Image (cartoon, helix red, strand yellow):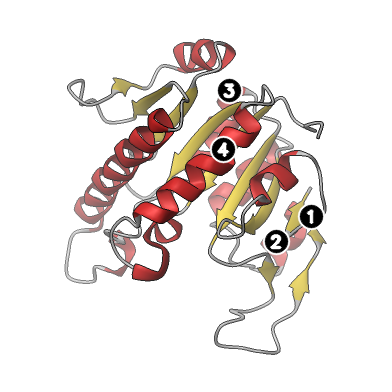
Amino acid sequence: MKPKYKRVILKVSGEALAGENHFGINEEMLKKVAAQIKEIHDLGVQVAVVVGGGNFWRGRSSENMDRATADYIGMLATVMNALALQDAFESAGMPTRVHTAIEMREVAEPYVRLKAISQLKKNKVVIFAAGTGNPFFSTDTTAALRAAEIDAEVILLAKNVDAVYSDDPVTNPDAVKFDSLTHREVLEKDLKVMDSTAASLCRDNNINIHVFGIAEDGNVMKAVCGEKIGTIIT
């Protein structure tokens, strides 16, 4: 199979890493994600990963806590997920580096744009953790920002659901599935693909987004090779 893209950002939600447990890290999901990334890594695709932290902590749902504090706790949750992914990737034979937006040199490198690009060119998988390093910004916004910074051609948005729907398909069986959308439609319809800041950043920088389910084997390869799975946002 021939890849459509040379450099991609894969956004993995924390919830996806929890698998059926719905909390914490599911080792089978780690292995599944690592196996799918190895398939495209072996094709020579440069892969950067942005990981969420919702399997441990969702700052926005902490009503009684200062929002900035809650967001910082969420950033630390993404670091735990990033280190778990790094271990899984290394075990699968992929050299991996973790960059954090909050400095913690004992466990990861501080984020440096040109260093990350250099590592990608050397076929190392780069994981971006701790969000943007600022509260009030989601890891979706991190994915959009890092994609713009490293000149990624597409954001692969790996989720628990297999596409973008008009409503939550779990609670609404009449929810309509979208095969393709524009950034403008995502914003105007207020679709919960990613937050509005991230969607606007992708629109303004002409970054395509491909939304698909991470649980099905081979989906990352299909997305990278341009197969029409899930929802493509252009």
**Mark 2 in CB contact with mark 1 (< 8 angstroms):** yes
Helix, strand or loop under label 1: loop
Q: Nearer the viewer, mark 2 or mark 3?
A: 3
Numbered tag placed on residue 37 in the rendering: 4
Residue occupied by mark 1: 182
Residue occupied by mark 2: 186
Q: Quadrant of residue 56?
A: bottom left
**Residue type, numbered disc 4:** Ile
Label 3 – label 1 distance at C-alpha: 22 Å
| Residue at image coords 50%, 46% | 33
Mark 4 surroundings: few (<14), some (14-19) or many (≥20) residues within 10 A: many
**Mark 4 in CB contact with mark 1 (< 8 angstroms):** no
Q: Nearer the viewer, residue 185 or 113?
A: 113
**Mark 3 in CB contact with mark 1 (< 8 angstroms):** no
Going from the N terminus, do you reach mark 4 or mark 2 first?
4
**Residue type, numbered disc 3:** Ile
Label 4 – label 3 distance at C-alpha: 18 Å
- Percent of width and height locating residue 130: 33, 38
Label 2 – label 1 distance at C-alpha: 6 Å
Helix, strand or loop under label 2: helix
**Can residue 129 be spotted in the picture?**
no
Numbered tag placed on residue 150 in the rendering: 3
